[in-house]
Image: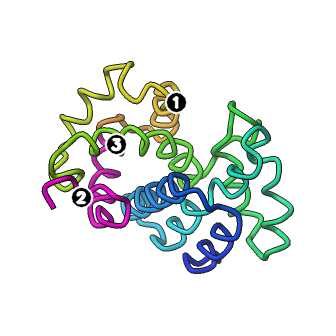
Amino acid sequence: MLTLERAKELNDSMVHEEHLIIHAKNVMAAMGAMAEHFGEDKEHWMAVGYLHDYDYEKYPEEHLQHTKEPLLEAGVSEEDVHAILSHGYGIVNDVEPVTPMEKSLFTVDELTGIIQACARMRPNGITDLETKSFMKKFKDKRFAAKCDRDTILKGCEMLGMDVKDVASICIEGMKPFAEEIGLLGTEH
């Protein structure tokens, strides 16, 4: 099973841009919270979340086309590689998210971008971000416009959950990592 330590080793060998590392950490934190929600292995889900954009920095135009073989060769399980590939479903591939882990990754990848943008505007960052504040920003299509809300909604539908519930889980999951992900705010 993929450990967080191994995921960081692998990801850090390919990803060096600060904003991509922050994104990996955001998704890692959100995936840990989703794992707890589903009663699954938190560290395992965090590891998959951290590693999900393994090839993005090097191959942004061919995202997820340079992921499967290198990760399998590095000893990452077929199941974990499938989970990583599935976050590109309908965007860059046709690997459908089936398991709760895969559906969660598909959903939180974009969702964490909006949470991060929302938290960055607040004096206390994510530390006091509430779901209702997030939802106001989520409904404003001009806010964090690059984050694909349709993908988030599609993912929530796959999970059988409301976007505010998934957002709440992710926000709470990201709070303990506020300093690490640069979301402590300007008041700290």
Q: Secondary structure at mark 3?
A: helix
Q: Secondary structure at mark 1?
A: helix
> Which mark, by number, is residue 154?
1
Q: Is residue 114 above or below residue 149?
A: below
Q: Which residues are magenta?
A: 165-188
Disc 3 packing (10 Å; few <14; some 14–19; many ≥20): many
How far apart, in angstroms, are the residues tagged by discs 2 and 1? Answer: 30 Å
Residues marked 3 and 1 touching at CB (< 8 Å)? no
Quadrant showing the C terminus: bottom left
> Which mark, by number, is residue 184?
2
Residue 165 is left or right of residue 58, and the answer is: left
Residue shown at the point (27%, 46%) measured from the top left: 168
Residue 123 is left or right of residue 33, and the answer is: left
Q: Percent position (x, y) of residue 112? A: 42, 45
Q: Which residue is mark 3?
A: 115
Disc 1 packing (10 Å; few <14; some 14–19; many ≥20): some
Q: Can residue 92 be found in the magenta stretch?
A: no
**Nearest to the observer: residue 174 or residue 97:** 174
Q: Is residue 28 above or below residue 76?
A: above
Count the numbered circles shown. Answer: 3
**Nearest to the observer: residue 38 or residue 184:** 184
Sequence order check, earlier mark of 3 and 1: 3
In the rendered structure, which amino acid carries the disc numbered 2?
Leu
Q: Percent position (x, y) of residue 144? A: 40, 30
Q: Secondary structure at mark 2?
A: loop
